[in-house]
Amino acid sequence: MRTRVKKEAITIALTGNPNSGKTTIFNNLTGTRQHVGNWPGVTVEKKMGTVFHNGHRLQVVDLPGTYSLTAYSIEEIVARRFLVDSKPDVVVDIVDASNLERNLYLATQLIEMGVKLILALNMADVAEARGHEIDAESLGTLLGVPVVFTIGTKNQGMKELLDKVLEVVEDRDTVSRHIHISYGHELEKEIKKIQDVIWRDPSVGERFSTRWLAVKLLENDSAVQERVRSFGEIGKQTLAQAEASRERLGEFYKDDAEMVLTDQRYGFIGGALKEVLKVSAKSKLDLSRQVDLFLTNRILGFPVFIFFIWAMFQLTFTVGAYPMEWIDAGVSWLGAVVSALLPAGLLQDLLVDGIIAGVGSVIIFLPNILILFFCIAVFEDTGYLARAAFIMDRVMHVIGLHGKSFIPLLMGFGCNAPAIMATRTLESERDRLLSILINPLISCSARLPVYILLAGTFFGASAGNVIFSIYALGIALAITMGKLFSVTLFRGDIAPFVMELPPYRAPTLRSLLIHMWDRSQIFLRKMSGVILVGSILVWVLSSFPRSPYLPRGQAVERGTTSATQERLLTLAESQQPVSPLMSEDNLKNLDLNNEMTRLEGSFLGRLGHLVQPIFAPLGFDWRTSVAVLTGFVAKEIVVSTLGVLYAAGADVNEESEALRRSLRASGMTPLGAYTLMAFVLIYIPCLATVAVIRRETNSWKWTGFSIGYSLVLAWMVSFLIYQGGRIIGLG
């Protein structure tokens, strides 16, 4: 038998319930050959990757995790739209083998769509540990779908899965066949009536499964109704028949047709499982339930969760300190090389003081960002993230939300922009808006460089605890503002909620590293984009208008060989009174004073003095005031701005340490540093997050409200911290 002509690329759609291990299998198949974007028209994440197998190029698409294909959430709509419109060559449904009944519901809907389907029974080891014996061959025969066992966390079954994909695509699989899930006489009669109307236009039947359309119309699916309406006159007739069928079924069953169809599907699944599933005495204890007795305990669960978060930030600061030093040394070396290669002038200043010093002062925090994202990936892949939401459910009820709302907040520790996008998984519009408004109070990774710089400079060995307290302050403020908003702006009952607790799994290092790298790319893209542009802008504003003082490190050749004599000459020409007996340290101080005078006269200095009265009650000088203004674009730019304004006069190859020395010598106190950290935590989120708020709320009113309240709250909290600290003698 001749096989079909080999296509340039075979498209595989991976679908499955959340927590079924779908993403782990996607990572196993594609490794680093994957890229992330957004689905057209929406901000749901789109993952695609490539794998080569037996001479074939396979394009793997990781669809959003969903429990069904009913158009309730954006994720479900995106997944269904791809399956219907893009028509992948084969669909692989990743099924949690230890929870077949719930997972097979999605499989029944895929069967109705008439797609070429493969079931991957994942977490087969977990099912075996629970005493589940699955007859895969019988299951495949009953469903007309080939079945493959996989263990994603151990990278097992991947070759078998790809082999089966090629068999199904090339019509070589003997199990694959299309079956009809029987819904009983009355339902089947109405389905047939709707199909008969649709088939009046044969072109519709060629593009879609008419049975699937009929079932979705009986379920009163709005998205399918909209599509059928586009069929013209046949569409109108089809919708009219569907309406009549729903009314008749409602009278017959005394219930909605959608509920009857759901019951029938679960009845079909239950019957199939009686044939293929045997549950024997467990040979092992259910480890997940045993661990949950401790981790989700009403008394112990919360302090354990707090400990894990504290440990995450301690690890981020202490372990990240070592590679930070190496990167800092590399940046300093690069600055010294460029200084030696280029003559003194504007170009050298731009490259060394603007680009290398500005971007370099931020890139040294990359190790901390990587460690933070690694820890979040561990929480997610082990299954603890769902437990954190469960633990926080009682706390979230205080602010009028439920535990599921805590997941976007926890994601905010990585980045507020995707965390706000994640609120679309919340069914209630009230819950979404409330979560969006308080999410920026959760400290994202972009603020971390500011915390590490200030805490490391002023708090020494206690820096980790200080940073943890800042994160705790953000959580406390989110709870407080959430409560305030829920009793004023968003009055109403809390939406009912049941949190799924997936089994604990040992994550693979490969999967953790891929998750860490995917999320860290956001930080790296900022380095080559907004931070680079911001650093150049800060340098331009701080360098112009040009002053009569010479730039740092620039000497005028007068035929002398002594650096001290050169600086004496420079200072003399600048009309600075200099004694010939001045020491080298005094000369350095005069250099620094000259540079500070020049900076104060620059555009940046003038801007700082203009806004400084607003920030004076918070203990901010003009330089700190400028830094918080530039931080609106991206919080990382706060560090590069401080580097330009405070480290003036420092040797390039000691930039980072010089900045710390300059901060301590500037008069900033530990109290002032903590106040600045608190302000950076609370005030306007970065420009990207503001744009996401506008897109997700579709309202300039809520976007403006988010900006306004965060500014006022930041000033008030910082004022209380600084002035209160001075009153009790901490200033």
Image (cartoon, grey):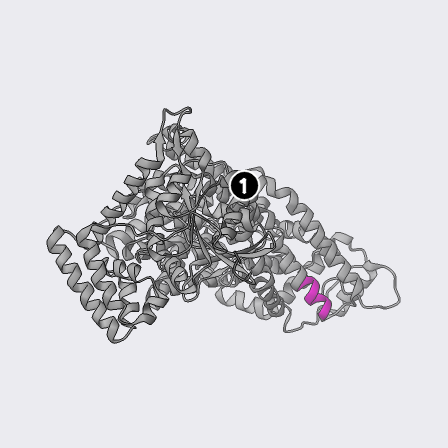
Residue 535 visible in the snapshot: yes
Residue 437 visible in the snapshot: no
* Residue 405 screen position, x and y as percent: 34, 48
When asked about the image quadrant of residue 159, the answer is top right
When asked about the image quadrant of residue 86, the answer is bottom left
* Residue 534 screen position, x and y as percent: 57, 65
Secondary structure that dominates the magenta span: helix
Residue that mark 1 sits on: 155
Check residue 188 for magenta coloring: no
Instruction: Note whether 159 is above or below 235 in the view shown.
Output: above
Q: Nearer the viewer, residue 467 or 576?
A: 467
Q: Give the range drawn in magenta.
A: 347-354
Instruction: Note whether 441 is above or below 286 in the view shown.
Output: below
- The answer to whether residue 42 is left or right of residue 554 is left
Q: What residue type is labelled 1?
A: Asn
Please give the name of the residue rendered at 50% of the width and 48% of the height, measured from the top-left corner. Answer: 164
Instruction: Note whether 286 is above or below 695 in the view shown.
Output: above
Please give the name of the residue rendered at 71% of the width and 52% of the height, measured from the top-left corner. Answer: 330
How many numbered discs, if any? 1
Please give the name of the residue rendered at 30% of the width and 54% of the height, measured from the top-left corner. Answer: 427
When asked about the image quadrant of residue 221, the answer is bottom left
Q: Is mark 1 on a helix, strand or loop?
A: loop
* Residue 313 screen position, x and y as percent: 51, 41
* Residue 466 screen position, x and y as percent: 50, 42
Q: Nearer the viewer, residue 528 or 353?
A: 528
Mark 1 is surrounded, within 10 Å at the Cα level, by few (under 14), some (14 to 19) or many (20 or more) other residues, namely: some
